[in-house]
Amino acid sequence: MPQRIVVVGGGAGGIGAAGAAKGTDPKAEVIVFTEYQDAAYSPCGIPYVHGGEIPDFERLFLGTKQQYADQGIDIRYETRVSAYDTAAKTVTVAGQPLPYDRLVVASGWNYGKPEVPGADLTGIYYMKNIREAMERDKTLDSVKSAVVLEAGPLGLEMVTALCHRGIETHLVDPSPWALSMATDPDIVKPVEDSWIEMGAKLHFNTKLEAILGDADGAVRAVQTSDGEITCQLLVIATHKEPNTELGAAAGLAVGSAGGFIVDETMATSAKDVWAAGDCIEVPHGVSNVPIQGLSGSHAYSQGKVAGVNAAGGRRTYQPVYVPWGLVAGKWMIGGVSFSETLATALGIPFVMGVAQGISRARYYPDMQPVKVKLLAEPGTLRLIGAQMVGGEGIKERADFLAMAVRTGITLRDLATMENVYSPPIGALNEPIALAAQDALSRLGS
Amino acid sequence: MAFTRWVRSVSEKQLLTAAHTDMAKRYGVAPPPRPAGIDIFWQKVYAPIYHRLPWTFRAKMMTLMPGSHRQQWTPRPPSGGPAV
């Protein structure tokens, strides 16, 4: 009798798990439940369709529904799982228990809903579901003014996208600078300056107090601690809350970061139940503190690990070092592990080096500035974090520096690193090396 | 919300706010608003005491909280240096 593997959630984690489970045990019956009309698309691409960089939403789908059916993955769309029973090994669907042999929970996340009056008005956009995004996009040309609430990664991308659409865009954030949980004010300043050049209005240290509606129950303005801002669209880009309600009710252990507790195989506290994606927490490789709410690539990798193990194979995941990067305003911004702000918040001791370099030979057309900031452990000088902003080359440096942190590379290694010098693609002096040399110079080394 | 989740959530927010104040001074940007109400305790008492404790003690307290970090995570073998 083939085993039945049930996957709850059709996002990156769930689809990664389903595909990996089927690949590990081709005879297995793999059923994916998603409450949405679609599965297996890239929500990360949505801001770029809104901004006009990507011409249509269809490109965001990883595969067609028929392709998944042809692979033997049974995706049940618009079908909500309302409960898990890990003792009886069933999930409840439409009021009926469905038995499983192995369960993978990839229930994802929800936005933190603003707890202010007016939160139920129309015109409030929680950007996540592609069908809603398609409908919203049709109305964007009639929006004169929009507010983006909070400058997290999605918020940064939506401010940029809405500016590209010619919409008067207001960013409202209770923190003192954009992406302040992950980056430093000197790193994000070029982004903020470029938003202002693009016509955006930035309201930092500003709290949302109420959402105001018109006679038809649609958003017409937001009331903030900095006054009233007229808008026809409010984009919610608040922090991601892990969706753990059903699992917790079924007894799955939840950790201090709010996600399901898992081990290196993505196994939860319940027998024959694995979990992956934004609903779990994983340890940070430097601090060993569990964290939650990473990227789509993390969710997909975790899903594959969960799927392989659920199907009877063996694969393990690793603590994370979190390389990240995005385009915001006219710049690319990125980093790894700790920013100076976060290290200061946690009280982690560090030494630092900063350098302003360039991305290509100084004389080559389209040469871009690249600023790199490195943080390292005092004494050993092992890298613990990095922050960068520039016109190009940020993603590659973030990936490289994540491996540097993971493998214990030191400032001395980076200060003497070899680098590609080719006028169209690399400068004589690599900005990472310059930043490491700056750090050693500050130490008198 | 479980107690440890609450402690971590509040602690993170308040320590980040304290760091924002430090960083704002360091980089010449507008700092967060002055604390009010219960935030005065967190900013004026909790955050300074937190930072006076040794890092090793704070790290130990963080690892005692329930979480995935306390499960099995097999370290990778150390690098053997460049291949021949």
Image: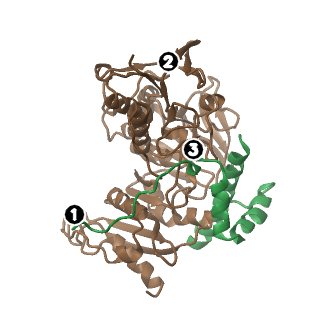
Nearer to the camera, A285 or A220: A285
* Marks 2 and 3 belong to one chain: yes
Q: Mark 2 points at which residue?
A: A79
Residue depicted at 48% across the width and 84% down the height: A443
Disc marking residue A425: 1
Callout count: 3
Q: Specify the farthest residue to the bottom.
A: A444
Residue type beneath disc 1: Ile
Shown in green, the chain is B
Q: Distance between the residues labelled 1 and 3?
A: 36 Å
- Quarter of the image for the C terminus of chain A: give it: bottom left
Nearer to the camera, A43 or A81: A81
Residue depicted at 39% across the width and 37% down the height: A304
Assign a secondary structure to mark 2. loop
Q: Which chain carries label 1?
A: A
Q: Going from the N terminus, do you reach mark 2 or mark 3 first?
A: 2
The percent position of residue B47, horizontal first and vertical second, equals: 72, 64
Do the residues bearing badges 1 and 3 touch, measured as CB atoms within 8 Å? no
Residue type beneath disc 2: Thr
Position of residue A72 relative to residue A324, above or below, is above
Q: Distance between the residues labelled 2 and 3?
A: 26 Å
Position of A33 with respect to A23 (left or right) is right
- Quarter of the image for the N terminus of chain A: give it: top left
Q: Name the residue under label 3.
A: A239
Shown in brown, the chain is A
Q: Going from the N terminus, do you reach mark 1 or mark 2 first?
A: 2
Position of A283 with respect to B53 (left or right) is left
Looking at the image, can residue A236 be seen?
no
Q: Which chain carries label 2?
A: A
